[in-house]
Image (cartoon, helix red, strand yellow):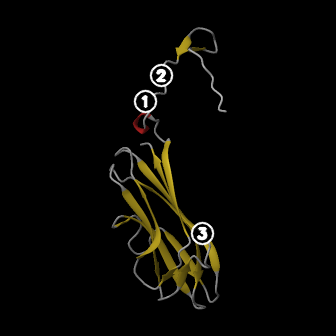
Amino acid sequence: MASKIKVDQIQTADGTGTIALQNQLSGMTGASMPTGSVLQVVQAVNTVRDIISATSFTATSKTQTITPSSTSSKILVFCSYVINDNTTSDVTGYTTIYRGSTNLGNSTYGIGKLRATNTRMETTQSIMYLDSPASTSAQTYTLYFRATSANAFELPGNPGQHNTLTLMEIAG
């Protein structure tokens, strides 16, 4: 059974006043939270294998949607993914995040970079980006990837490994 504390007032530490508590928290909304407060968190966990065969930014299956409660809210995007290279030659990969059709990173280099040199490698990578969509419409974020040579990378490296895309609405 959950515990409850019922009081009508709290006295200040120095005893000079009281704080009335009638309905202080009822009706609390995201808009009334202080700047920097986390308003909501959504996460997609994905184990689908994506083979990156394009040298231009291409959508992966790592995607998630959030609906901001205010136009002043910011969205913190955090993506963690397992990746391995499919070749034993020098190859570079770039990751970025798209909001809808908008690339949030650099059009050539994205937000993150991975370099493999003459060896097969597997690693966990992560990228983070703070976005300001200025909208209360649903916003879809997707991890995009490109490689410097075709069929160079796989996400995740092995079946069953988890990739996560986490979105946090932050009060603005």
Comparing 50 with 110, the one in front is: 50
In the rendered image of this protein, does residue 135 appear above or below residue 118? Answer: above
Horizontal relation, residue 15 to residue 28: left or right: right
Q: Which residue is found at the position 54% from the left and 81% from the top?
A: 154
Tag 3: amino acid: His
Amino acid at pointer 1: Gly
At which x and y percent is residue 100?
Answer: 35, 64
Q: Secondary structure at mark 1?
A: loop
Q: Label 1: how many residues lie within 10 Å, few (<14), some (14-19) or many (20+)?
A: few
Cα separation between marks 3 and 1: 38 Å
- How far is mark 3 from mark 2, CA to CA? 43 Å
- Residue name at image x 49 percent, y 27 percent: 25
Residue underneath mark 3: 162
Please state which amino acid type lies under the numbered disc 2.
Asn
Q: Which quarter of the image is occupied by the N terminus?
A: top right
Depicted 2 relative to depicted 94: above or below: above
Reading the image, the residue beneath label 1 is 27
The image shows residue 94 at horizontal and vertical percentages of 48, 75
Element at label 3: loop
Name which residue lies at 54% across and 82% down. 153
Q: Circle 2 is placed at which residue position?
A: 23
Q: CA distance from mark 2 to mark 1?
A: 8 Å
Secondary element at image label 2: loop
Disc ID at residue 166:
none
Foreground pick, 144 / 5: 5
Query: Which is more toward the observer, 46 or 169?
Result: 46
Image quarter of residue 69: top left
* Location of residue 47 in the rendering, given as x and y in whole percent from the top left corner: 56, 72
32, 7: nearer the viewer = 7
- The quadrant of the rendering that contains the C terminus is top left
Direction top: furthest residue: 16
User: Of label 3 and label 2, which has the lower sequence position?
Assistant: 2
